[in-house]
Amino acid sequence: VMSMSIRKKLHKDGRLTRKEAATYEQLISTVTQRLQNTVNYVMRQQNLDALVYPTFKFLPDKISKGKQSYCGNNRLAPALTWPAISIPFGYSKVGNIRLPQSMDILGPANSECKLFQIASTIEKILALTRPLPFFLQQSESIDDDDF
């Protein structure tokens, strides 16, 4: 856990002494290593090559509501310092508008080739069932139902 004095200083003006910065770097490194070890352990126990999860927890609010919320799940890869790839997997409907959705595929360090293989396989499977985007469909007119 980050010491309270460092946390207060970061919140106040973002400036640290060299000693505080070194302590902060050590804390971040320790937390990252513990998280990597934990996720590695779970993946080995479950015999997983990768973790797959939706990029966003919630659908976005309509702009007309006057608020926007961002609830991305994509914080795990940077926290672990592991590679991840995001691919589209379909659409969700908000009112009468269809919004594209995506999934993140996360793998352990140096698993980029495996992630590309997994992503390619998923995209090939989904291509068989995913409808074409409205602008690729042949239609006489475009209305709200096409989104």
Image (tube, grey):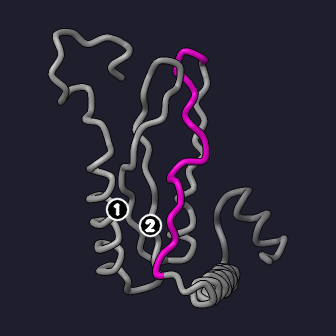
**Residue receiving disc 1:** 122
Q: Which residues are magenta?
A: 49-65
* Residue 133 placement, left or right of 52: left
Q: Is residue 7 left or right of residue 101?
A: right
Ranked by sequence position, the earlier of labels 1 and 2 is 2
Q: Can residue 48 be seen here?
A: yes
Alpha carbon distance from label 1 to label 2: 10 Å
The answer to if 95 sits in the magenta stretch is no
Kind of residue sitting beneath label 1 = Ile
* Residue 41 placement (x, y as % from top left): 63, 89
Which numbered mark, 1 or 2, is in the foreground of this view?
1
> Within the magenta stretch, is there residue 55?
yes
Q: Is residue 15 above or below residue 19?
A: above
Tag 2: residue type? Ile
Tell me, for residue 147, which label it has, or none.
Answer: none
Give me the disc on residue 105. Answer: 2
Instruction: Tell which of 80 and 17 is nearer to you.
Output: 80
Depth check: 89 or 107 in front?
89
In the image, 135: left or right of 67? left
x 80%, y 77%: residue: 1
Percent position (x, y) of residue 15? 64, 66
Quadrant of the image containing the C terminus: top left
